[in-house]
Amino acid sequence: MDANKKGLAKANEIYNSRGAYAREVKKQGKRVFGYFCCYPPIELLSALDIVPVRILGDMDEPITLADNCLPPVMCIFCRSAFDIGMKGQYDYFDGFVGAHACDGAERTSFIWSNYIKSPCNFHLDIPHTTHNSAVDFFKEQIEYFKAELEKSAGEEIKPEALRKAISDHNHQRALVRQLYELRKPDPPLLTGTEMLKILIAIMGMSVAEGNLLLTEVIGEVKTRENVQEKKRRLMIWGSLIDNAVFTELIESSGLNIVIEDTAIGTRPFWHDIVETEDPLQGVAEHYLKEVLCPRTFRDSGSNYAQDSDSRFGYLRDFAKYWKVDGVFANIIRNCDVHGYEAPVVKDYLTDLGLPVIMIEQDYSTTSLASLRTRFQAFAETIGS
Amino acid sequence: MFVAGIDIGSTITKIVIKNETEILSTVITRTGAEHRRMALQVMTDALANCDLSFESLECIVATGYGRINVPFADQQVTEITCHMRGVHWLFPTVRTIIDVGGQDSKGIKVKDGRQVDFIMNDKCAAGTGRFFEVIGDVLGVKLEEIGPISLRSEKPADISSLCTIFAEQEALLRLSEGTSVEDILAGLLKANAARIHAMVSKIRIEKDVAMTGGGAKNIGLVKALEQKIGFPMVLPPEPLITGALGAALIAGETARSLRTEELRAKKEKRRLEAVTFFDKDSVR
């Protein structure tokens, strides 16, 4: 790791070598915990000065070992994450936080804790509705999580430390939203690929280091000249993208990615945690109600149109303020939660006059090339 | 003004040379393994057909799976847009295009001469020309005979699997049970038509429907699809060239939109040669 690198160059370096970065962090005496998905409240980890590292898969690595333990018909992302876990790529974790984000993540978490040894394992149960009783239940689960973490760390999470962590993470959310502001101009000041690398970088850093990096990036990007040409403006909705090869393919096919409603996009950052008297109340409400992955069911409205509008109105706003020309609905094969939601989202966006291209892909860089024709054709469709 | 459109498909390479109003020359040939030489070959042949020089072409657009392998093309456009443009020029009333190619199949939705939606299967051989090549080999029937033979069937066989490999096994099983080749072929065509129909239905099939690509030359597949859709489709006189035709139409538009000196600059850079990975200047 080059200590002199700053801003985008640093984000790029950490994106390219997350493991090496995490091992360096450990050498400095910090503990590193891996966590699945964007639902575990990492504020609790930060409050104990533990560095939260988001578990990702690897689109470049063929899945082999995972197939001995997980059925091949389940989400390829989960299988891939588990596969590289089995291959030792996350052997630096001092703890593993699994989550019942979706059913795939739940199964993978349990199997992970059986096969991949870790000094601390926790499985966070997350209800799938947003009713008051669900929030109460979730808050209780977070309390269990807190107790387990305290046991593992040998120290209590002090209320002031938790409040500070919440405030630091809220600051991080605000900084990420500032980055999104820089993508409003046409052409955007920041490419989708750069954004992806920055977000993946900060998802492997302490909140303080992450915030420093974000501040550097914002300063750097704000003042630079146009880095890309004007192209059709694309919003991505759906399963996460965690490899820049994919965003590069899209952005070299006549499209600029301007906003992404995904788990490595707006979802973890769009809303702040409200600082409630009992901090865990705000934490529970935030994660259950404001992280908008379709893994959580929100019934609202008495008919199809009202329900769609109340659930996806934020996409209409994204499209309006980021001047979106078309939407890519990205489904990782066998991602149930997005697969089931996609037809409604497509309907809703199409009714708003937004063209949608829906692609179910194999989460593998080797199978990406065949998608180029579709993205180019989509750019031609919305450009004509 | 002369322009050309070249469509390097996975299986067949096509070229169209056009003036403002009509098609002057077309060449259709198998792509084969010599992908990169084929562009040069068809261009040379097509120019000879209509007695034109390479320099007389104002603009060249490449499309298809191999569109990046045409070193002398001024522009690359996807086959989706090109098929749409070609079909719209031939049949302005068409709203839905079903293209069954050698390696993929697609549906394209047209409105007011613009494509509004498309859907593509490039993952699975079912519903593509490759399926019929494989089955033709197994049953000892030439590709072009599959359609006519299938029409003789009175009782299409039930084929439950559409995986090309399993369908092959199933066809052999039916043969061993004594089912006739025409019934097996009719069954396979019906099953493939159902699959293509299901895919294209996702973008809503609306009248008129045109069918293009090699699949449109299989009368059995055309009939089976028409039965599914419920009305007849329109077929271009040569269903293989709509992509190249569309590319030539786009080339014409580009040529008209550029100033004379811009066109001249483009032309000067252009060389009629096969792409090679060793000469930096000829690789795009």
Image (cartoon, coloured by chain):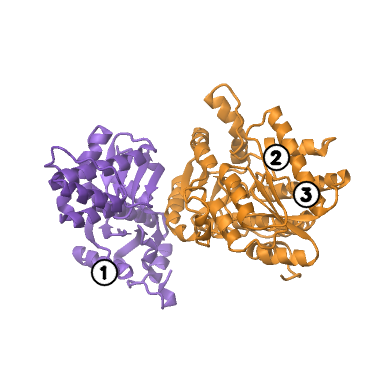
Chain colours: A orange, B purple
Give the number of the mark in front: 1 or 3: 3
The numbered mark at residue B41 is: 1
Inter-mark Cα distance, 3 to 2: 18 Å
Residue toward you, A99 or B190: A99
Residue A344, horizontal then vertical, whole percent? 51, 34
The numbered mark at residue A287 is: 2
SS at circle 2 = helix
Are the residues flagged by discs 1 and 3 from a single subunit? no
User: Which residue is drawn at the image coordinates 41% and 66% (left, top)?
Assistant: B266
Give the number of the mark in front: 3 or 2: 3
SS at circle 3 = helix
Residue A306, horizontal then vertical, whole percent? 57, 25
Are the residues flagged by discs 3 and 2 from a single subunit? yes
User: Which residue is drawn at the image coordinates 19% and 43% (left, top)?
Assistant: B186
Please report whichever mark, 3 or 2, sits nearer to the chain's N-terminal start. Answer: 3
User: Which residue is drawn at the image coordinates 50% and 56% (left, top)?
Assistant: A68
The numbered mark at residue A149 is: 3
The outermost residue toward the top is A302
* Amino acid at pointer 1: Gln
